[in-house]
């Protein structure tokens, strides 16, 4: 009986992780759209900025729908409590990645991109690229988590290294923001800093997600 229950629980766990991959796929689309958004923002193309923000909003909403389905399925209890708790932590941490990306782009829509220093826009784009790389790695880590936990652990380490790179980029961006604030309008200065901080927060949530993957992987080794 216990062997049968373990098989059922394991199968449901695999299915739950596959749905997490779907969730991360939508978050990846949010991130990819943010890359296009900040390319448009860098070139001060307002029409393109608005279009890309609509894409971000729609993909983030789809990610939310998947998140709700995952939580609903997990609430039924047909999975080991430890596995359930860790998967919930992973989903919520990943969901925050998309939320912070959307926050960064929403703030950017509040100002005329022509008024924002070009280097700040460039650093924002680079941070977006790093976050996108991290999300793609997270997706791969979850995909192999059940069958190759050691590989998932190694990929999670790569995500942490990317987050550290984003920290370094953020410091350079903030240095530029501080100089920019000496000569810009207060409102534009605030928005510029909020953009940088939100993108850095999204990278932090990538690392948080990687930390949860590490825990799940260790439990399976």
Image (cartoon, rainbow, N blue to C red):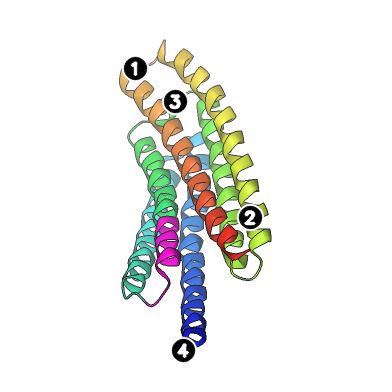
Between residue 43 and residue 167, name the one nearer to us. Answer: 167
Regarding mark 3 in the picture, which secondary structure is present there? loop
Between residue 139 and residue 12, name the one nearer to us. Answer: 12
Regarding mark 2 in the picture, which secondary structure is present there? helix
First along the sequence among labels 1 and 4: 4
Q: Which residues are magenta?
A: 78-91
Q: CA distance from mark 1 to mark 3?
A: 10 Å
Circle 2 or circle 3, nearest the eye: 2
Residue at mark 3: 116
Label 3 Cα neighbours within 10 Å, binned few <14 / some 14-19 / many ≥20: many
Q: Relative to 12, is 42 above or below?
A: above
First along the sequence among labels 1 and 3: 3
Q: CA distance from mark 4 to mark 2?
A: 32 Å
Residue at mark 4: 1
Regarding mark 1 in the picture, which secondary structure is present there? loop
Magenta stretch holds residue 126: no
Label 1 Cα neighbours within 10 Å, binned few <14 / some 14-19 / many ≥20: few
Circle 4 or circle 2, nearest the eye: 4
Residue 43 is at least partly visible in this image: no
Residue at mark 1: 185
Q: CA distance from mark 1 to mark 4?
A: 69 Å
The residue at 39%/56% (across/down) is 60
Residue 221: image quadrant is: bottom right
Magenta stretch holds residue 87: yes
């Amino acid at each position: 009986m216990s062997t049968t229950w373990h098989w059922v629980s394991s199968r449901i766990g695999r299915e739950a992780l596959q749905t997490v991959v779907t969730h991360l796929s939508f978050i990846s689309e949010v991130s990819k759209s943010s890359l296009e958004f900040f390319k448009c923002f860098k070139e001060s193309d307002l029409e393109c900025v608005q279009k890309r923000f609509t894409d971000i909003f729609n993909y983030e909403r789809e990610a939310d729908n998947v998140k709700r389905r995952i939580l609903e399925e997990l609430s039924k209890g047909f999975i080991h409590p430890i596995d359930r708790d860790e998967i919930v932590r992973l989903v919520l941490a990943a969901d925050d990645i998309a939320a912070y990306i959307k926050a960064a782009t929403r703030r950017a829509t509040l100002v005329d991109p022509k008024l924002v220093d070009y280097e700040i826009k460039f650093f924002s784009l680079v941070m977006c690229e790093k976050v996108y790389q991290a999300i793609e790695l997270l997706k791969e880590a979850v995909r192999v988590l059940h069958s190759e936990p050691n590989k998932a652990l190694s990929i999670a380490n790569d995500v942490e290294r990317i987050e550290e790179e984003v920290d370094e980029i953020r410091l350079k961006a903030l240095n530029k923001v501080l100089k920019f604030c000496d000569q810009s309008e207060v409102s534009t200065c605030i928005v510029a800093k909020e953009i940088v901080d939100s993108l850095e927060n999204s990278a932090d949530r990538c690392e948080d997600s990687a930390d949860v993957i590490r825990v799940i992987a260790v439990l399976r080794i």
